[in-house]
Amino acid sequence: MEKLESEEVEYESVEEFLTSLRKEFGGGEEELVKAAELRRMEQGGKTMEEYVQEFKRTVRGSRYEGRPLVEEFKRGMNGGIRRKLMEAENLPTSIEQWYRRATALDRNWRESRRKEERLRGKKEQGGGVQKQERQNLPRPLMWQRRQPLPQQATTGPALMEGIERTNVVVVREAGAGIEQSIGASPR
């Protein structure tokens, strides 16, 4: 400042002055910007690989390291993956371990979702056809044991117990019997 006040130092442009100032006092403003970017960063709909790459780019020049770096990474990742990692038996200890394990969990989760969607799609396509085919199939015959007809006197041995040889058709509806004679006179 003394040199500047005594006008001993001259700069050709404002840009040259700012470059000199940054060189002298460091990039404090850049570090603050990087730290603010890290705090705003979230995984959202990105894959973990994409989030990790973006996180690594932002970390460069931020002077974050160790525990604060891990905390910022955890804060920005999706809650489900963070919970799984926090509930794990052996927590990751370094940022590299956090990157690897979070990426593996994200891949597994996304793969299982794809498989579920494929299975759901097959069920919807195949299930509808099967349902339709089942409706078109004839229903199985329902055999019911009929009440034996009242015994009438016959001249020969009964072929089957409870069944008579007759030309009478018996139609029964809910307890009411209707008898019709077909082609022969009743005995």
Image (cartoon, rainbow, N blue to C red):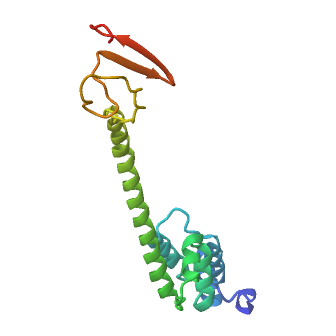
Residue 96: x percent and y percent?
A: 47, 87
Residue 175 in the image, given as x and y percentages of width and height: 51, 24
Left of 181 or right of it: where is 102? right
Residue 23's place in the image compared with 108, above or below, is: below
102 w.r.t. 160: above or below = below
* Image quadrant containing the C terminus: top left
Residue 149 appears anywhere in the view = yes
The residue sitting at 37% across, 11% down in the picture is 180
Quadrant of residue 151 in the image?
A: top left
Residue 37 at what x, y percent from top left? 61, 72
Q: Residue at x 65, y 88 (%)?
A: 25
Q: Is residue 168 left or right of residue 41?
A: left
How far across and down, in percent of the image, does residue 41 sit? Answer: 59, 70
Whether residue 98 sits left or right of residue 171 in the image: it is right
Viewer-side residue, 84 vs 184: 184
Q: Nearer the viewer, residue 117 or 13?
A: 117
Q: Which of 6/148 is in front?
A: 148
Quadrant including the N terminus: bottom right
Position of 44 with respect to 162 (left or right) is right
